Amino acid sequence: QQQVKQSPQSLIVQKGGISIINCAYENTAFDYFPWYQQFPGKGPALLIAIRPDVSEKKEGRFTISFNKSAKQFSLHIMDSQPGDSATYFCAASKGYGGSQGNLIFGKGTKLSVKP
Amino acid sequence: KAGVTQTPRYLIKTRGQQVTLSCSPISGHRSVSWYQQTPGQGLQFLFEYFSETQRNKGNFPGRFSGRQFSNSRSEMNVSTLELGDSALYLCASRTGAHNEQFFGPGTRLTVL
């Protein structure tokens, strides 16, 4: 049972464009939703995270939009740059405040930003 | 602050052997989680240790085990290796009071 579904699998965007990656979850007990960026040969790096009591969070060019009723959240990368080319993973966990250390990950989206 | 470190970075073993991987968390972090990353299954949670106690466990066979030491360093062990155990094994640390997990570079295990 895939608890976090991520789409698309791959995405090609022109430099300066907006990259949008979507995730849907099933377990309403999830209360922490991070996004990770992974470059080849590296471990995932935490980009930005959100809790369900907030509908949007922005950090620089990265924005998370959260829709609790639809059980969906998305990552928007504004002004996409070639250096953003990487694989992006959404994740979810329960027990905000630290009691749960097990992240459930989506399958990942490979983003290519063309110059 | 130094990040999460994992040793070794690469490992080649044969079926039936056992392997031990090591993880040193960020200073001050008391929780260490282990994940397996494969092209087919993606990132899957193995287990989490906090203050030397296993706190959570994923859906993996008993051949996968781990432990944590008093200095928060952690090891994971895989016994009786199978070809399907070939993967990138990632360690992540967090303070334990917050959810943010920071990953190490991983150990690439190849089973022949």
Image (cartoon, coloured by chain):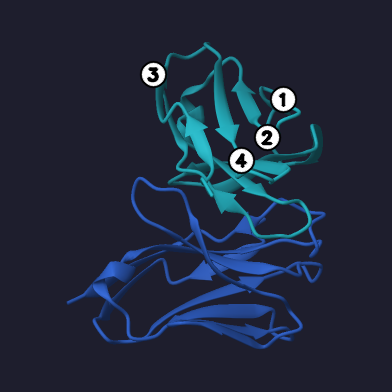
Please give left or right for residue A86 compared with residue B76 in the image.
left
At x 49% / y 29%, what residue is drawn? B84
Q: Find chain B in the image and tell me its colour.
A: cyan
Chain depicted in blue: A
Q: Are marks 3 and 4 in contact (CB under 8 Å)?
A: no
Q: Quadrant of the C terminus of chain B?
A: top left
**Picture coordinates of residue A5, whole percent (x, y):** 58, 66
Considering every residue shown, the one lying at the far top of the view is: B17
Q: Amino acid at mark 2?
A: Phe
Q: Going 67% across and 61% down the picture, which residue do you hit?
A: A3
Chain for numbered disc 1: B
Cα distance in 3D space between marks 3 and 4 = 29 Å
Residue type, numbered disc 3: Leu
Q: Secondary structure at mark 3?
A: loop
**Residue at the disc numbered 2:** B60
Subunit of mark 3? Answer: B
Q: Which residue is mark 4?
A: B25
